[in-house]
Image: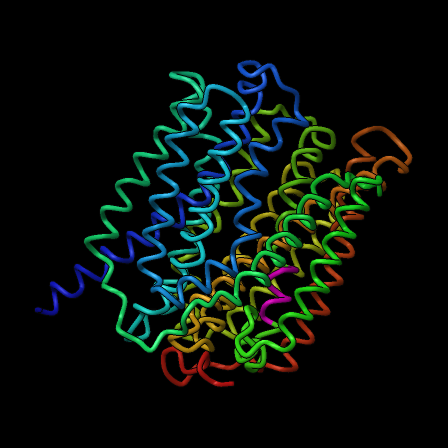
């Protein structure tokens, strides 16, 4: 095959992975705006309808490590294609849903496919990167995820005003079908490796892990700042499952949480930082609407456009983040991103309400640009530490840390904002501003502590050659 033909196939494969990543995010972000219409059509309230969102997100957390094991055992391309077909099936079933129960089951199928699309696109991008293109591939996937997040509300709103909410799922099904066909053509067959077999002994710990993570996610979703009996029971169930999982894994010859990955230099630090950064990013998404409406007095339409600015910044920053990763090394780029995130949190915590919209947009721009740097550098470093046989498992761990961070950020920072704003003196605008400051002050402290610990373990210096920095322990 000529050089131009190889480049064409490579970019088709990259486009397929980028589309799969964007679709996984689009399936989540396009749903929120449809909830009022679903409430009318299904005669349901918000407590029931929030399951239309949770049913999509929960499989992405509960199944993510199992998906990594499946990818390592049967081939990442094969399992990614299975995820795409599940996504198509779930989207079609959602479009045809006659009732809420049908819709929730269909969304769970779609979310299971999306989990495979997110995790295994990352693994395949790392596998196919060559000639120093790893940073560019990771930057493109970060941009694709942000693009899906930003397009969701806008695209969903346009379709809702036209053919209705079923058209949202019909479009997702068509896009996923096209992506599956492109992936079949462009993605190289899985290499013939000595793959670890999936064993019957893997099933009990996998089920325990899924049950524990599901209970934890439900507890975080239902807590709303109070420890009700139901939330307490879910937390207890999560702890019991975690304890049983640990006992089963302690004596296992091949545990789900691959110890060779966790023992790699800086791997635990990278995963904890990913969780923390995702939680802080979620703070801007869950607190932002309240601050924009109550603090700045903006309409819902204007607030929605401003909230889309963050994902757009990430999307536009992806290529630059990839280039910086390849030039200066992933560890340096991730450290710069972490420093920028800490600066953005400090700005959110200190800038006064009197600055108006500028006091929101400046920290948001710094936050989202720095998030692009951190994600690209951190993901590249983690995937480089994983050998070829464990890249799917490493990608699954990254996505697990991200999902747990998003869930924890939603619960913890919503609670902090509510407590701070309710106890603040002054009018609604002042109370909202105080709540924003009280959310991001501890976030800034945590980010600074993470930055100090990370720099102590992984010095930031220019890479001597592309990706060389990532390969150092």
Work out whether residue 317 can be spotted. Answer: no
Left or right, residue 162 beside residue 228: left
> Is the residue 470 above or below the residue 291 in the image?
below
Magenta-colored segment: predominant secondary structure: helix
Where residue 236 sits in the image (x, y, percent)? 79, 52
Q: How many marks?
A: 0
Tell me the quarter of the picture where residue 127 sits.
Answer: bottom left
Query: Where in the figure is residue 268, as x and y percent of width and height?
Result: 61, 73
Q: Is residue 34 visible?
A: yes
Magenta residues (range): 270-276
Q: Position of residue 289 (x, y in %)?
A: 65, 34
Residue nearer the viewer, 7 or 71: 71
* 14 with respect to 376 (left or right): left
Q: Position of residue 350 (x, y in %)?
A: 76, 51
- Magenta stretch contains residue 274: yes
In the figure, 132 relative to 219: above or below? below
Tell whether position 184 is magenta. Answer: no
Residue that appears at 65% across and 76% down: 250
From this view, report whether residue 230 is shown above or below residue 388: above
Please name the residue shown 55% across and 43% down the image. Answer: 57
Q: Quadrant of the N terminus?
A: bottom left
Q: Residue at x 33, y 78 (%)?
A: 194
């Amino acid at each position: 095959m000529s050089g131009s033909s190889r480049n064409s196939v490579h970019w088709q494969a990259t486009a397929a992975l980028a589309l799969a990543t964007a679709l996984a995010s689009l399936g989540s972000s396009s749903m929120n705006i449809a909830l009022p219409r679903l409430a009318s059509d299904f005669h349901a309230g918000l407590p029931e309808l929030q399951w239309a969102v949770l049913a999509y997100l929960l499989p992405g957390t509960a199944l993510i490590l199992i998906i990594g094991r499946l990818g390592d055992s049967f081939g990442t391309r094969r399992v990614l294609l299975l995820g795409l077909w599940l996504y198509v099936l779930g989207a079609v079933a959602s479009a045809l849903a006659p009732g809420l129960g049908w819709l929730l089951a269909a969304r769970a199928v779609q979310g299971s496919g999306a989990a495979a699309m997110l995790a295994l696109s990352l693994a395949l991008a790392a596998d196919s990167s060559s000639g120093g293109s790893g940073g560019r591939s990771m930057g493109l996937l970060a941009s694709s995820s942000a693009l899906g997040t930003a397009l969701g509300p806008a695209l969903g709103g346009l379709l809702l005003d036209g053919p209705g909410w079923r058209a949202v799922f019909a479009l997702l099904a068509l896009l996923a079908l096209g992506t599956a066909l492109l992936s079949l053509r462009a993605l190289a067959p899985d290499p013939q490796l000595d793959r670890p077999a999936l064993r019957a002994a893997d099933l009990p710990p996998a089920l325990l892990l899924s049950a524990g993570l599901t209970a934890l996610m439900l507890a975080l979703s239902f807590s709303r700042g109070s420890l009700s009996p139901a939330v307490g029971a879910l937390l207890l169930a999560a702890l019991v499952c975690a304890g049983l999982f640990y006992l089963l894994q302690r004596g296992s010859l091949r545990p789900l949480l691959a110890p060779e990955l966790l023992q790699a230099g800086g791997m635990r630090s990278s995963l904890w930082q990913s969780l923390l950064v995702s939680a802080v990013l979620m703070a801007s998404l869950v607190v932002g609407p309240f601050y924009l409406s109550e603090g700045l007095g903006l309409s819902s339409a204007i607030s929605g456009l401003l909230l889309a600015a963050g994902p757009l910044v990430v999307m536009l920053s992806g290529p630059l983040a990839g280039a910086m990763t390849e030039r200066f090394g992933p560890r340096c780029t991730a450290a710069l991103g972490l420093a920028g995130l800490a600066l953005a949190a400090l700005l959110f915590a200190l800038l006064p309400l009197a600055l108006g919209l500028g006091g929101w947009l400046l920290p948001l721009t710094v936050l989202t640009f720095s998030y692009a740097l951190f994600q690209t550098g951190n993901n590249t470093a983690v995937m480089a530490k994983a050998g070829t046989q464990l890249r799917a498992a490493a990608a699954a761990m990254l996505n697990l840390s991200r999902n747990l961070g998003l869930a924890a950020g939603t619960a913890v920072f919503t609670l902090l904002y509510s407590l701070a704003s309710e106890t603040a003196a002054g009018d609604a605008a002042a109370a909202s501003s105080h709540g924003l400051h009280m959310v991001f002050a501890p976030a800034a402290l945590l980010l600074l502590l993470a930055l100090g610990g990370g720099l102590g373990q992984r010095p930031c210096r220019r890479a001597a050659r592309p990706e060389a920095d990532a390969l150092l322990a």
